[in-house]
Amino acid sequence: MDQLAWLPAHPDLGAALSAARAEDNPATLLASAARLAGFRRDFSATARIDRLAQRAIAEGAAPASAGLAPYRVAVLASHTVDHLLPAMRVAGLSRRLALAVHTTAYGQYRQALLGEDAALAAFAPQMVLLALDARDAPLELPLTASEEAVETAVAARVEELRRLWRRARSRFAAQVVQQTLVPMDPPLFGSFEALVPASPWSLVERLNAALRRAAREEGVLLLDLAWEAARLGQGQGLGDAVRWHQAKQLVSHALAPLYGDLVARIAAAAAGQAKKCLVLDLDNTLWGGVIGDDGIAGIKLGQGSPTGEAFLSVQRYAAALGQRGVILAVCSKNDLAVAEAAFADHPEMALKRGDIACFVANWQDKASNLRQIAQRLNIGIDSLVFLDDNPAERDIIRRELPEVAVPELPEDAADYAACLAGAGYFETIAFTADDAARGRAYAAGEERRAALEEATDMAGYLQSLAMVLQAQEVGPAELPRTVQLVNKTNQFNLTTRRTTEAAVEALAADPRSLALSLRLRDKFGDNGLIAVILAKPAGDALRIDTWLMSCRVLGRQVEEATLAVLAEAAAERGYHELVGEYIPSGRNGMVEAHYPRLGFEPCDPPPGAAPEARFWRYRLGAVPLPSHAIAIQTQREQVLTP
């Protein structure tokens, strides 16, 4: 089985690993391990890469030196997982994470969570994975058990897991991930299996359905191994009887690289490292042929031919990604007018020009154009995934822009969508109405940019936008999107602290604290939730724990308007000053001068502050608030013009 098929094959991975092993500099060694993790690899190569990375870290290499974010994962399992840990760590490297992985004794997940596990507490996991198998705590029911008896037993088992999830969340404020169950026993009834409520496969299916419902209600994420087993087929390394009886391995050595990647992509999403934007080539990627040579009528696209239908499936999948919140862009070596005409004039186009937030078609090199796309969208270059049929172009981008994800596409366009889906670049931890509207919000950003280019003065341009900032305290409706924004925003994020729904909910319930969500709309449309403020009491000051904003609203005085909202809320709670904190993360340098620019003065750090943190104080009423061109609407007030 071809694992990690979206990764490029290294011409000589063994030789590259041997060469890296001779490296003396720990930082260079870690960077080499992270680079080699981006190639297709089996269990043996994965283990060698992990040894290189672990050696580099043991010798003092800082994860940040290789562009990696540290993240701690505890794996509490009812099956053997030791052979899977290197694969998790290496997959983390390929997704810009330095994963530290902690395990407990075999089958001791209940004791670890319900008792006092000192080692687990010291590890302080940011994510807890409950990796369970179908033979752990089986439902002892006779085959003749009624539907009601089966549902009662399933509900009791899921309720036990709910208690464990809540315990993990309350003890560690960690993101909980539940692994779904893979059938281990052969079916008894053939195709009649699902019609017998207590049959082996029917029980597992019912448990998984109940787990998914409960996870949605509890804010728990899923490692849906059951769906992966259905995709791979029985006996392909999941639930293999030989491995189980030999070593209680649910996942075989051969399948470890894929399993590790499934874990790492969830961790990356929880750590805010998932990709945001799919950049599409055009010729022989979205349609067959070269539009500049073949013309609109000559390209292969749509019903009536296998090739045309294959390319149509690529477009439909890209459009569906856009509908779930992935930003869509175009990067093509083409004449702009000719390229855009296909979107308007070809009757079979599933993608429309309005779906594309940034459209770049010219004869410059694609690396420069990808930089331009990231800049125009106000997102990091590491947020991009580039889909291109041309192997030479893929190789150039991997060499020139290693931060950009470039899947290795199969030969037939019919397999492009499956390859892109299999790579898991756009793994998410939530889906909200704001996510679904994100593509349109970025497209509206292009309209604002065009209006700015035509404006004669900035003040007049900002006034013409007719902006309204809507501020409200975080409630149940705003909670999922608020947490999602906190956990994935990296650039305009003063502290880059991550959090959980439970932590934000507790903060919002504290009358002395503040949890604000802010939305922005203008004449071009609704930008959605664009900023979050989380603040806690510190004596007679309100200390800003988290201040983050979407980069797509920068340059429009939203920071100044947000400070006005924050100052009013602090004064209402009886505070006399605000204290702001900045912690450099390697990715948030753009906000280093945020507080002084708004009029904050430097102040001494409080006890227990991080050594690298810098603090500023703003005395309410001592100096006028910065001016801005944004009307403000709070929960209690109508729109107040600036």
Image (spheres, rainbow, N blue to C red):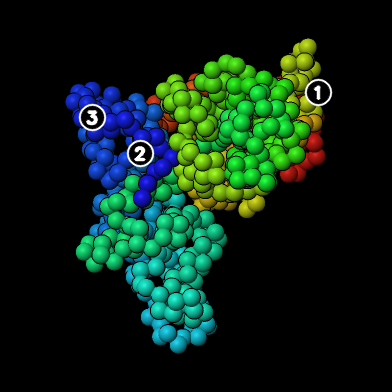
Whole-percent x and y of residue 178? Answer: 43, 58
Quarter placement of the C terminus: top right
Amino acid carrying label 1: it is: Ser
- Neighbor class of circle 2 (other Cα within 10 Å; few <14, some 14-19, many 20+) is many
The answer to which of marks 3 and 2 sits earlier in the sequence is 3
Picture coordinates of residue 632, whole percent (x, y) = 75, 33
> Which image quadrant for residue 199?
bottom left
Residue pointed to by mark 3: 15
In the image, which disc is placed on residue 40?
Answer: 2
- For badge 2, the amino acid type reads Arg
Along the line of sight, which residue is nearer the eye, 606 or 263?
263
* Local secondary structure at mark 1: helix
Q: Earlier in the sequence, mark 1 or mark 2?
A: 2
Residue at 40% x, 79% y: name it: 188
What's the residue at 21%, 64% (across, down)? 246
Which label belongs to residue 70? none
Percent across and percent down for residue 222 are 47, 56
Left or right of residue 511, residue 604 in this image: left
Image position of 306 (left or right of 92): right
Q: CA distance from mark 3 to mark 2?
A: 14 Å
Q: Of marks 1 and 3, which one's residue comes earlier in the chain?
A: 3
Which percent across, then down, holds residue 615? Answer: 48, 26
Look at mark 1 in the image and give the residue it sits on: 464
In this picture, residue 501 sits left or right of residue 342: left
